[in-house]
Image (cartoon, coloured by chain):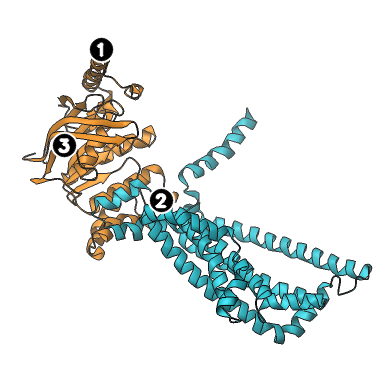
Amino acid sequence: MDQYDKQLEHEIPEFDHEEHGQSSSFDISATVNAVSVHGVKQVLGIVLVAVIIIGGWEALIHLFKVPEFVFPAPSAIAVALVTSMPTVFPHFLITLGELAAGYAIGATIGLLLAVLLTQVPYFEKIITPYILLLITTPAIALVPLLMLMLGFTIWPRIIAVALASGPMIMINSVTGFRRTDLAKIALAKSYGATTSQIFMKIRFPLAMPMINVGLLVGGIFGLITAVGSDMVGGKQGLGNKLAYYSSLARMANFFAVIILVSIIGISIWLIMAYVGKKTASWQE
Amino acid sequence: MGEIIINIENACKVYESERGPVNALQNYSMDVEEGDFVAIVGPSGCGKTTLLWGLSGLHPFSAGKAVILGKEVDQPTRDVGIIFQQANLLPWRDLMQNIQFPLEIMKENITAYKEKIQELIDSVELSGFESHFPRELSGGMQQRASIVRALAVDPKILLMDEPFGALDAYTRDEMDTLILNIWKKTKKTIVFVTHRIEEAVYLANKVYVMTPRPGGNSAVFDIDLPRPRPEGITMETAFFQTVAKIKKKIVSDVEKQKEQGLYQSQAYSTVT
């Protein structure tokens, strides 16, 4: 009996919070404290795992005397990262530029197409097969063709990035714009909202969570394509450096470039997490 | 009370569905006087909501007409505020931004409404929650916010479509009392759709009964319970008798349709 009561005591307030969702509003400070304590623990955990992995990796390489051209030790990679920075950094900027330009083009066209298609369902039916074709065909495969047309410039790579990220952003945004909440649209209409007001104030915010997913996935696809295109068709860029160092078996330098690629990838993820928090945190 | 401000004549609504046309509303007529509180009851699926949406101009009638304030309804107007079944708040806006939403749509100068909105928020006991998001508010608080949203525009007529159907029994009773207070204070004309006869009798001056689908006029009951109505009135004999009278009418309507083989089962069980 006692035990049961105690259990209830624990459960009922919990249930209440779930139902009315008021807890977050009333004890925000408590939540923040809990999060920060939790956060510190989490960060410590992550750092600990990193220390174990990197330390173990370093130890194993030295223990088994693995030559650097087979598999470099973390210390060697760190040294390579610092010493090769002057040579590699311009390539970092080139890949970043390809990605940024291609992504901007892809995102703009993808979003505009998504808006257009969802407003005119007939268009959607006609264009969808072609978009599927674009999504399923790796854009990297088109780089040689683009190079025939555009030469050894940066443009084939920018276009490849746009072709990889644009359709991703488009299909996710289409899914977002298709989410219609008739009651909310009726509410807007009952005050005489115009089509563009309904779009800006209802459909767009409603689509935002899915648009963010598209922007994230599109960014990652764009990065893959940028690095891949460097490998296939260029004398510059991080992908080109990866191919170059691996052909010379300079694996410490190779891994240093990988780290730079990862930095771009993680930055994309962090930026989109921030954008998501700002624009779509209402969706749990 | 005074002149007739809502006039519905032979309103019909046919929905096109995949299985052919559905007759939702047939030759429904009613008049509502200014300042009146009218409830519409009827079995599930009888077309109560259809009637309200037609009246609001959101889904115009297929035939017949509705005249509000001397103008035939063909699109929504700001003289008519709608309170929906769900609070229908926008989850990406906080409470204040939700309340200002209609003003934004109508491109009104929001600062001119600041004082009035605050007054309304205070009157429904939501002060202090202005910057809360809908997910942080209980169902009752959300519905109160939606009432403030409708009142901020100051419509002459409030159309309420089972507004408290999704709330628990206690909150529902509180909301009924709140709506009576608002009606007394603002003197709005209210058309209140509900499937709960007790709620209709407690709130309204007149209770219109609709026939089972297709919804048509069945009967009108004048509720001559005293005003103001204390909450305890729902436990008095006169109240029960009125409720019973209306229930009997609905049951007999359904029976009659069944005899004629016209009744399309619409989960009649909700009218109990």
| Colour displayed for chain B in the image of the structure | orange
Q: Which residue is mark 2?
A: B134
Upstream in sequence: badge 1 or badge 3: 3
B103, above or below A85, in the image? above
- Circle 3 SS class: strand
Q: Which residue is mark 3?
A: B63
Q: Amino acid at mark 2?
A: Pro
In the displayed structure, would residue B138 be above or below residue B47? Answer: below
Same chain for labels 2 and 3? Say yes or no: yes
Between marks 2 and 1, how big is the CA–CA gap?
48 Å
Which is more toward the observer, A87 or A52?
A87
Q: Where does residue A63 sit, x and y in percent of width and height?
A: 93, 68
Q: Type of residue at label 3? A: Ala
Toward the front, the furthest residue is: A148
> For chain A, what colour was chosen?
cyan
* Numbered disc in front, either 1 or 3: 3
Residue depth check, mark 2 versus mark 3: number of the one nearer the observer: 3
Q: Nearer the viewer, residue B234 or B196?
A: B196
At x 72%, y 62%, the residue is A46
Which residue lies most toward the top here?
B259
Tell me the kind of residue under disc 1.
Glu
Foreground of the two, B128 or B249: B249
Q: Is residue A281 above or below residue B43?
A: below
Query: Residue tagged by mark 1?
Result: B259
The earlier-in-sequence mark between 2 and 1 is 2
Marks 2 and 3, Cα distance to the nearest angstrom?
Answer: 38 Å
For the residues beneath circles 2 and 1, the answer to whether they share a chain is: yes
Classify residue A84 by image quadrant.
Answer: bottom right
Q: Position of residue B211 (x, y in %)?
A: 22, 24
